[in-house]
Amino acid sequence: MSGVISCKAPDGSLCGYISIIGCTYSSSHIQHENASISADLNTPAEFQWLQDMTYPSAIVSGVLSIMHPQLYEDSMQGMSTLEDWSSMYDPVMNRTLSLWPTAFTNISLIANWSTPLHHDPQSRASWYDVIVNVGEYTDCVMAVPTLGIQLVYKPGTAVAFSGRLLWHGVNAVEGNQYCLTYYMRDNIHQWAHVPRCADWMRINGVEHLLRATVL
């Protein structure tokens, strides 16, 4: 895991932020010398976490395959390329990617923290992030001022949108709130030399799927 920040709230509940990265790449170095997984994503506990997340993460990937088929196909190609490369150069990464439960390259978990308004500059404007909220809490709202809207953010809510294009944030709440964010980093796709989906999702991109469902 990477970027781990954790603490205890006054009531004893866990709060913090964890970023889980299946592959990371720093563009300041030579290709193929520095592709790697999160520094601590090689222990039995982290591997068990990946296995436990297989089912919910597969659902999120399935949702992406319907909402944005081209992005899903490009992402799966990227994962396949990374698995092939790691099978030769990095067995630890290869083992991790064999368990990686989603088409997204990154997963972040935010526990009991408010999220100030922000956007995600390492993605692409036409790409979707998927955010899933779970727990037991009340009075949570996601603000998207770019669109002039506020979304009621109840437990079990999933939201998909362009995290780079749209400013967004979530208020602090009472109770236990856990936010799973699935997203991709553009430089990983660039490093892997796979298509970097630049097309906006439009209804005609899924019309054939809708027709099949109706029939």
Image (cartoon, rainbow, N blue to C red):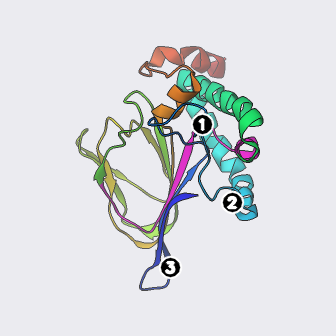
- Inspect the magenta stretch and tell me whether residue 5 lies in it: no
Q: Secondary structure at mark 3?
A: loop
Amino acid carrying label 3: it is Ser
Mark 1–mark 3 distance (CA, rounded to whole Å):
40 Å
Task: Classify mark 1: residues with Cα within 10 Å, few (<14), some (14-19) or many (20+).
Answer: few
Identify the residue under disc 2.
46
Q: Earlier in the sequence, mark 1 or mark 3?
A: 3
- Inspect the magenta stretch and tell me whether residue 96 lies in it: yes
Mark 2–mark 1 distance (CA, rounded to whole Å):
24 Å
Mark 3–mark 2 distance (CA, rounded to whole Å):
21 Å
Label drawn at residue 13: 3
Identify the residue under disc 1.
33
Q: Dividing the picture into quarters, in which one does residue 9 lie?
A: bottom left
Span colored in magenta: 93-116
Q: Nearer the viewer, mark 1 or mark 3?
A: 1
| Residue 67 in view | no
Label drawn at residue 135: none
Q: Establish if 155 lies above or below 213.
A: below
| Residue 145 in view | yes
Q: Secondary structure at mark 1?
A: loop
Locate residue 63, reporting x and y percent. 58, 35
Locate residue 80, reporting x and y percent. 69, 29
Q: Residue at x 60, y 55 (%)?
A: 39
